Amino acid sequence: MTMSGNLHDQRRRSTRDALRRVALDRFAHDGFANVTVTELAEEAGVTERTFFRHFPTKEAVLFADYETHFEWFAEALERRPKDEPMLDAVLAAMDGFPHDLEVVRQAALARASLIDGDRAAGHIRLVQSSFATVVTDFVRDRYRHIPNVDLVAEVAGATVAAALIVALQMWGRDGCEGDLSQISAESLELLRSGLAPLN
């Protein structure tokens, strides 16, 4: 990538982060329904058109912490040692994400309190599907030599994604208290154990 390409990417990320921080602050202070895209764009010093280049809807701001993970997560999984067990690779890749936990916390609290259940559920399904796709592709590529790899990859992607989304939702419902990494690890450990508590 060229120097100007890197600069463009940095500016783009900076604008997206600024919009997100402004939106989360305004949603928390004034309520989600009482804030317009026009106001958010103006406060961030950009146009509405710029806002919509970064976020297709106002609700999408509340889910951006998920959506920014996918490309990074796929690349982080690819860098994991080839002999590392799949669930360990997933946890290590997630733990290495350079996120701002306070912004993630604000978004989770806002999701839990500011948007209705049906709209949140629709976004969560999309996020879960995206997580599942990343894990499925990783398993299919890394374990292509095993029998029925397509079935194994699809099941692994679906179950790992579900476990991670449940961990994130529980963390959000509990007021974002506790260690998100630990809750995620416990969710994946349940999968690894074959849901041993139920046996």
Image: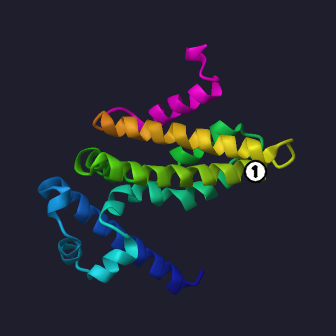
Q: Considering the whole magenta stretch, tell me its main secondary structure.
A: helix
Counting from the top left corner in percent of width and height, residue 20 is at 30, 64
- Where is the N terminus found, in terms of image quarters? bottom right
Q: Is residue 184 magenta?
A: yes
Question: Can residue 105 be seen in the rendering of this structure?
Answer: no
Q: Secondary structure at mark 1?
A: helix
Q: Which region is colored magenta? A: 176-199
Residue found at x 58% / y 47% = 93
Q: Is residue 49 above or below residue 97?
A: below
Q: Is the residue marked by circle 1 packed among few (<14), some (14-19), or many (20+) residues within 10 Å?
A: many
Q: Which residue is mark 1?
A: 140
Q: Which sits in the foreground, 115 or 180?
A: 115
Residue found at x 26% / y 51% = 115
Counting from the top left corner in percent of width and height, residue 59 is at 32, 60
- Where is the C terminus found, in terms of image quarters? top right
Residue found at x 22% / y 79% = 45
Counting from the top left corner in percent of width and height, residue 21 is at 27, 62
Q: Is residue 181 magenta?
A: yes
Q: Which sits in the foreground, 199 or 42?
A: 199
> Left or right: where does residue 112 sit relative to residue 10?
left
